[in-house]
């Protein structure tokens, strides 16, 4: 065996293990639902940990045909809030996989 071949094999195995853990984490994140809300809960948006919108709930009282702009603002705010929560969850889970190292191209 050539010198350093064992080290290369070890690095390859570590990379494969990290990739496997990342795929498991991604599957787990798909099952975790986060909520963003606005207007005192009049608008709620639910996203999973993979930043996929799962549902939007709007209370009838929030629907005012003469104020469509207001409703759009509430929805936008709720979506941003939910997406921020999902990104923070992704970051925490990624740090568990990478041991806190920042690896380019290894995001979700």
Image: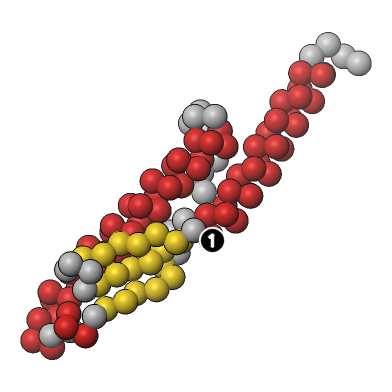
Q: Residue 2: which quarter of the image?
A: top right
Which residue in the structure is indicated by mark 1?
Answer: 31
Name the residue at 57% across, 54% down.
Answer: 28
Q: Quadrant of the N terminus?
A: top right
Task: Mark 1: give few (<14), some (14-19) or many (20+) Cα within 10 Å.
Answer: few
Q: Residue 8: which quarter of the image?
A: top right
Taking the view exactly as shown, the residue that stands out farthest to the front is 40
Q: Nearer the viewer, residue 66 or 33?
A: 33
Tell me if residue 50 can be seen. Answer: no
Q: Nearer the viewer, residue 9 or 29?
A: 29
Q: Position of residue 86 (x, y in %)?
A: 40, 53
Whether 3 is drawn above or below 46: the answer is: above
Taking the view exactly as shown, the residue that stands out farthest to the right is 1
Q: Nearer the viewer, residue 64 or 69?
A: 64
Tell me if residue 70 can be seen. Answer: yes
Q: Position of residue 36 (x, y in %)?
A: 30, 62
Name the residue at 68% across, 33% down.
Answer: 15
């Amino acid at each position: 065996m050539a010198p350093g071949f064992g080290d290369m094999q070890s690095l390859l195995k570590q990379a494969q293990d990290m990739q496997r853990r990342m795929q498991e984490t991604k599957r787990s994140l798909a099952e975790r639902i986060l909520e963003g809300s606005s207007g005192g809960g009049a608008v709620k948006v639910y996203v999973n940990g993979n930043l996929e919108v799962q549902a939007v709930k709007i209370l009838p009282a929030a629907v005012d045909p003469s104020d469509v702009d207001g409703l759009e603002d509430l929805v936008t705010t709720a979506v941003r809030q939910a997406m921020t929560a999902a990104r923070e969850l992704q970051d925490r889970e990624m740090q568990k996989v990478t041991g806190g190292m920042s690896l380019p191209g290894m995001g979700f």
